[in-house]
Amino acid sequence: VFLSPPPQAPQAPQAGREGVEDGVAALAAQDKESWMALLRLGNSSHLRSIVGGAGLAQVHSGVNAQLLTDVGKRAYYAQIASMLLRAKPMYNTTHAAAFAALAKLTYCGPKPGVFGAVSMSCSTLDLPGVSSACERGNFEVVPGFVRFLTPTGTSGDDAPFGFAARIVTRNAGVPAVGGGVVLSFRGLVNTLEAEKYAKEVPMNESLTGCPGCLVHGGFHKGYASLKGAIANVMQEFCWIKENCTLYVTGHGTGAAIATIAAWELAQAGYFVGPSYLFAPPRIGNFEFSKLMTTRFSGSPMAWGARPHGPVFQVTYGRDSVPRWPFDKGYSPWGIEVHFRDMDQSIDSPQICYAGQEGCGVQATAREDLDIRDHCKSPVADGDDLCDLQDWAQVCHGGLGFKVSKHLRSQMPYVTWLQQPENERHAKWHPAQSAGLQEGALEKVDSPREEYSLEALQAFAALAKVAYCGPLAGLKSAVQSTCMGTRGPCSKAGFGVVPTTVVPVSVPYFSTPDALFAYTALIRRTKSDFARGPSFLPAEACVLAFRGNINSANQNMTFNYELQALGDLQCKGCKISAGLKTAWEESFSGPVLQALNWTGCSPGGATDKVYLTGHGVGGGLATVASFFLHRQGFKVQLSWSLEGIRVGNPAFMDYLYSELPADKRPVALWQVTHGNDGVPRWPSTEEGFGEYLAQAHFESATNASAIQLCTKVGQRGAAEQQKVAVEPANIRPDVNATEVDNLSASLNASELANLSEKAVASEIAHFSERAYATDVSNQSARAVIRELANVSFNDSDIASATRHNASA
């Protein structure tokens, strides 16, 4: 299984402190170049004394000095030096090129032609003047032994994907990749030019048999989705573990998934042979880095044990991905093979420990990193790991062939079909995308900065589609409505990820399918939309509720007696009994399950949720925002379209103070139109509170004619003129300070307009409708109180009294 015989291992250090120091000195003497490079990894006075005055320049970014004692640190670096001594002669450029071809073929996706493409790219052609990449590496794929690796129950252009292939050695006695199974995993693609993994999340996943190890949740989730397919193919191709060697490869995020697969399969008893990963990101913490390096650097973990690997990480230029995530908790691991540029000889790359200061991608300052180097590699076909220019030919006929000049001159010119854009490698820049939304929100001062007509139109479209209900075509309707390339969602900067729509149809008491909602995963299309007024995260879920369409919905709505929440964090909070029952007894479990299936969970890689709905659906969205917030989700700026009132003032105050979590002024917008009475029902006289942020449209045809109101009781002027006044809005509890504060914000012309037009119309309205039977008892005091709440002007009150007497 070795590409070449390993060099003679240095004599094992003796036990004790002196033995470790002797071993370090012996390693330094054997390979001065490697050892001097390692001196840049740490800063230990003990090591400085051992190697003379050379010293150590800087602590390696992945090594936490507080975790290691001085002696342990010296032993760790001595072990790295030993691993480099063993691994360097085992790197083989020809084999790297063969693995690059297998990694690149994953970008063809799960197309039927890929079976033949893999076999052809990795076969013995025996044609004069033509050779395949694997043929030059002295191995080939067994015809008919290629299997797709796809998630169970999940499909789509951007679902995790890979393939497995059974390989055999061609000629004994020539350096070759030994027989076994190759697992190749695809890097990032999606239909939206979006950032699937471009979010710095806590390392929240552990690995089997790796104490203290934590890895990136997104990469672990990608591996977990393919775990079943991997197990099936290993059982088919590799049923006797001891006689089967496993190889892994992949590019970018595919290389990250391959890394986790290597650990888990080695832990399960499989042997991992020399492999090549291309431009992998950082995956886990220091403990993970240390144990991965120890296990997969071609050195035995115990005396007489069969060594795994080495697993080489091939990088190029100033690529930013191998340095991401930039969080200090992440550590690089293993052996890096770095090509500075295309002019560098393909046979003389720089080989060092990944993360070593001044070596490989670490030699570039963070601000100078360049995502354009991510797909480049001199060992790849066409010097590119992602671009399939001759897509139709490559994904059906294979790649990596070398053809003599004579044969190329005889080939006819053919214009090949290009790969569909939504299946190509997605170009994202982790150095620029992480934390953009949070940074932009920190600069927001005014609620008006968070209103976006494009966002409103997009979420209104998603709310409207909810009226389709649990029909078979719902999923395609949502995806077609909210594409990232065209339509209302594209203008708002996001789109629905294909195959992520999950319908939720639940009963209300004895009525089946009375309530309906759906979830979907959305992704930002460009980093520009992380800024205002969109403030979009890289990825989030949307939860859309259907409005009122049946008698069960009406029964739920009319059961509006306020019930206490019983939540210690929301003191005094009450909500509508019907809505409370609908969430707790019908929606809660299915919605949480649907969000999880869609890809969102509290504390997970994606924990952000948008909510939307119309009418009763808007009320359900508002109630759900509270419960999801208490579950640990990060509720984003949401939309209640003509939504009903849902709770008392204490509940509404909680939503607008706690949901934004000091990150933004507005929790959700209530959108109203014209004289619609639904947003003002149930009445505040019944104890219901109002939404604290309202976008009011007077016209159904002019979207620019909007009034944004962000205080309790404040409505559009037109609404004040035409909508009947509710007794609850006659507020005897308004104190002088509140009156002064609000009156100071109104200028003279506004007051005059109110007193001459709005006030007179308002009084006539309520005198005729609300107080006609009790004018003598209530008109004088009630009118004065109502006007005190609106105009705060003595002359207005006097005028109002005259108008009322006339009425």
Image: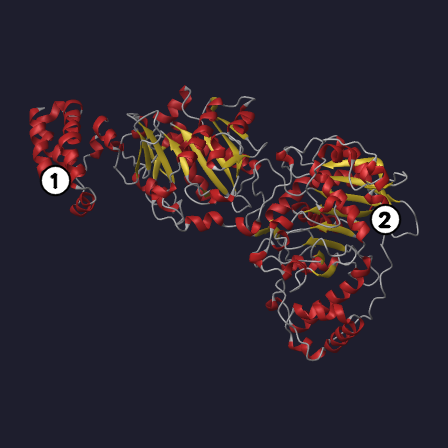
Q: Residue furthest top?
A: 551
Q: How many marks?
A: 2
Q: Which quadrant of the structure image shows residue 21?
A: bottom right
Q: Is residue 177 left or right of residue 357?
A: right
Amino acid, disc 2: Gly
Viewer-side residue, 157 vs 519: 157
Helix, strand or loop under label 1: loop
Q: Is residue 82 above or below residue 658?
A: below
Q: Quadrant of the C terminus?
A: top left
Packing grade of label 1 (10 A; few <14, some 14-19, many >=20) is: some
Q: Is residue 511 left or right of residue 223?
A: left
Q: Say which residue label 1 marks.
A: 793
Q: Residue at x 30, y 36 (%)?
A: 690
Q: Which mark is residue 607?
A: none
Q: Residue at x 60, y 37 (%)?
A: 190
Q: Say which residue label 2 marks.
A: 178
Amino acid, disc 1: Asn
The answer to whether residue 479 of the structure is visible from this angle is: yes
Mark 2 and mark 1: span between their CA atoms? 92 Å
Percent across and percent down for residue 701 are: 35, 24
Percent across and percent down for residue 105 are: 73, 39
Q: Is residue 154 left or right of residue 11?
A: left
